[in-house]
Image (cartoon, helix red, strand yellow):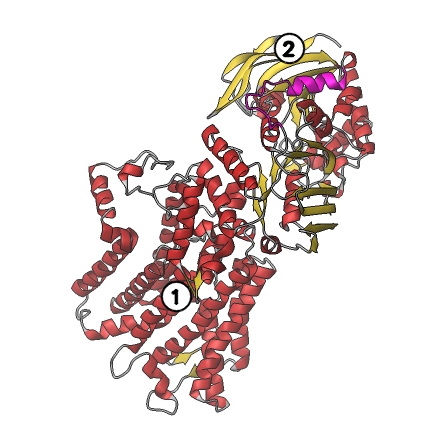
Amino acid sequence: MFIVNKGNKSDLGIMKEPGSRSKAGGRKVEKFKNLPFVKKVGFSRIVLTAVLILMYAIFCITIDGFAGKAHLMGTLNYVYFLGFLSLGVTFVIATGGIDFSIGPVMFCCALVSGYCFLNYGMPMGASLLLCIAVGLMFGLFNGYLVAYWSVPPFIVSMASMNIAKGAAAIFTKSMSVSWPLESADGGWFRKLATFNGFPTGLVIFLVAALICGFILNNTRIGRYILCLGSNKEAVRLSGIDVKKWEMAAYVICGVLVGIAAIFFVGVYTTVQPNYGDQYNNEAIAGCVMGGTSMAGGLASIGGTVIGVFIISLLQEGILAYKLGKDVQLIITGIIVIVAVYADVVARRRKN
Amino acid sequence: MGEEILRMEKIDKSFPGVHALDHVDFDLKRGEVHALMGENGAGKSTLMKVLTGIYQKDSGKITYQGREVNYHSTREAQADGIVIVHQELNMVGDLTVAQNIFIGREFMHGPTIDDKKMITESRKLFERLKIDIDPSARMKDLTVGKQQMCEIAKAISHECKVIVFDEPSAALTEKEIDDLFAIIRDLRKQDLGIIYISHRMDEIKVITDRVTVMRDGTYVGTLITKDCSKEDIIKMMVGRVIYEQPKEKSLVPDDAPVVLKVENLNAGRMVQDVSFELHKGEILGFSGLMGAGRTETARAIFGADPKQSGKIYINGTEVDIKSPQDAVKHGIGYLSEDRKRYGIVVQKTIIENSTLACLEEYMSGISINKSKEKKATEKVIDELNIKTPSSDQPVVNLSGGNQQKVVIAKWLVKNCDILIFDEPTRGIDVGAKNEIYKLMNSLAAQGKSIIMISSEMTEILRMSDRIVIMCEGRVTGEIKIEDATQEMIMNKATRNIK
């Protein structure tokens, strides 16, 4: 909700916030929201960070030995690939679209390029590039169908999810692919994730997030993506090639999914055909939790980064509780619903 | 004509900021066709919505068949025998004709729907109306005219006593209109009261018994159709006192070059063979009634909708405009009548909206030069007097008039030479309105050329240097401001071209 920060000008053609319901406690919150630091960083991001710290504290207190380095690294390992998926899908959701193919496409990338490395003697460097290229191809495919053929993104990405699974299974003859260990030939790529115990992946991810933030907020692609996500027809009538820029969002997403695949195998080594769906939900959860609106037009890379940390920490915590993957599926499912519902409520209040 | 069936007295209705109906009187007799006429926004539809329970009146009295009534929904009005045949058809295309007619009150055969009975009943209805439609045909396979007949049949199946036709002929062919009139005459013979809303003067003369004219939410008068002339009706429709002085003479020099020339433009049903010229520094008013095809013409020129044929010249060279992109490249800016849908990106800031059409001019390498952007935006905020605490306010926080100015700002930052303003002052307050008029005049004085589409007669007369009048997709007249009168414009705007 909008707050006028310069009181002396608040009477100038501005619609005031309708009937503020806030009582004494609410007023304190409003005051906090108006602090310069809070305004700069964003209130919801501060709340999210607090949630993250609180979660970590709870896990450390309730689980024996969670405070150690091992669980921290476990969380970070998850952050690497999930972060890239979430960054990618943030661009797509910013256009008002959705991509349910990111998880399976990530697996497809890892399977196809890993298979080429193992069976066709492709050098590791080329395999990594191929990995990104496969992601790019799916991005082009999804983007073209959504932007130029006007097929609903939901349908396109559902279909390409199945295409990714099927294509990968045929390519690898339904076999799983294990990427080389660090000591083996071509194993150097693992240093991208961890180098002598140092989380290089984290550095790369944060740099990637900074670049994504730059693209979204400081380049034409980002500006157009956000504007067309908010009102596509108005942008078209401003003489902008909306189709091109809408497709660009899916292409960016595709490339980031390809990179996610590298970090996935860099940590977890083995990929199997026919998997990957569960990461869709987690990536989307990280993104919407961070404040990106499913209706399009509003996106926050910073929010997505914090969201990714929360989801990753959550899965590590659930593992430590020995609750298993199934419980995690339920929890991320609930998170997506709650986060999207919060967005719906926020928008309804604005109107 | 028989006894009175309906009387509406001193009906008053206000919406926030608009006095839509100001103590309006209206009466209807059995066996009469009573036309309701007036310009756009005169209050015809509002009056009918009050009658059929869509709106609740603020005060006044409705007497129907001798008793006072006050409906709260169309359903109640329908049950009482008052039905409305809308201009837009409310039909489900995939259902059959019979299913559409009896939708919501299907005949049942135990738990299943008795389609057979619905078909026989529909056939009976059609026989009564002497129309030839197969009740088991799918609605979407019928022509618009036939669909309209079904809508009428549906209305009659409600055992109604009063039928309101809201511009029924707008989408019909000549033959279909004849059929429609035959039905209306038949209904008149059956002693129904019929209210007929139309802009087509010729039809009014042919089919109606009396004419009631409304203007700006007030009742002007009622005439017996056969005793009055077309000119009498027009005089009543436009006979308002004009507070703002109309422009006395064109401010455009006679030798001003033609910047935009449109030749035989065709785009769908609403744009047929449209030709006109726009001179440098001119404000060209586009007048006409609702559905005259003015917005459609603007959108076709701007490339927002596809066109079938026609040539467009800018500064004497033919240009091929296939999309808004091409139009903007050629220096055309379009301010839509619906700014929320087509004009602004509400969640984004004034800066982001202002530079949207020419962001490429605000780049330093791959990154947007935000300080340059801000400077340019603050300059137009000053120029246009946009009231906002800062340039990075989301547009959603601005008032309607200021939002409109942001759309104008977008085209000024882009520095367009040809501006199409489609209903530029719709829904904004008087103060902002005057500012926009002033701005348009100063833009024209700077040598920009403006096409102004407006449904407000006073606005057309006050702003235009020349006026093009459209009716049903065609240009029906072009008048210099020196010669223009309200009567003349309305005459051309209601001309029924066949």
Q: Amino acid at mark 2?
A: Gln
Callouts 2 and 1 close, C-beta under 8 Å: no
Q: Distance between the Cα atoms at labels 2 and 1?
A: 71 Å
Mark 1 — on which chain does it sit?
A
Query: Looking at the rendering, which quadrant does residue A192 occupy?
Result: bottom left
Q: Who's the residue at 28% across and 43% down the image?
A: A5
Residue B6, percent from left and from top? 64, 12
Residue B289 shown left or right of residue B387 in the figure: right
Q: Amino acid at mark 1?
A: Cys
Q: Residues within 10 Å of mark 1 (few under 14, many from 20)?
A: many
> Which residue has dot 2 on it?
B65
Q: Who's the residue at 25% across and 58% down the image?
A: A49
Q: Is residue B135 magenta?
A: no
Q: Is residue A86 visible?
A: no
Q: Nearer the viewer, residue B235 or A17?
A: B235
Residue A275, percent from left and from top? 45, 72
Quadrant where the C terminus of chain B is found in the figure: top right
Q: Residues within 10 Å of mark 2 (few under 14, many from 20)?
A: few
Q: Which residues are magenta?
A: B229-248
Secondary structure under badge 1? helix
Q: Is residue B384 visible?
A: yes
Q: Is residue B245 magenta?
A: yes
Quadrant where the N terminus of chain B is found in the figure: top right
- Residue A212: mark: 1
Query: Looking at the rendering, which quadrant does residue B49 occupy?
Result: top right
Q: Are marks 2 and 1 on the same chain?
A: no
Residue A79 shown left or right of residue A233 in the figure: left
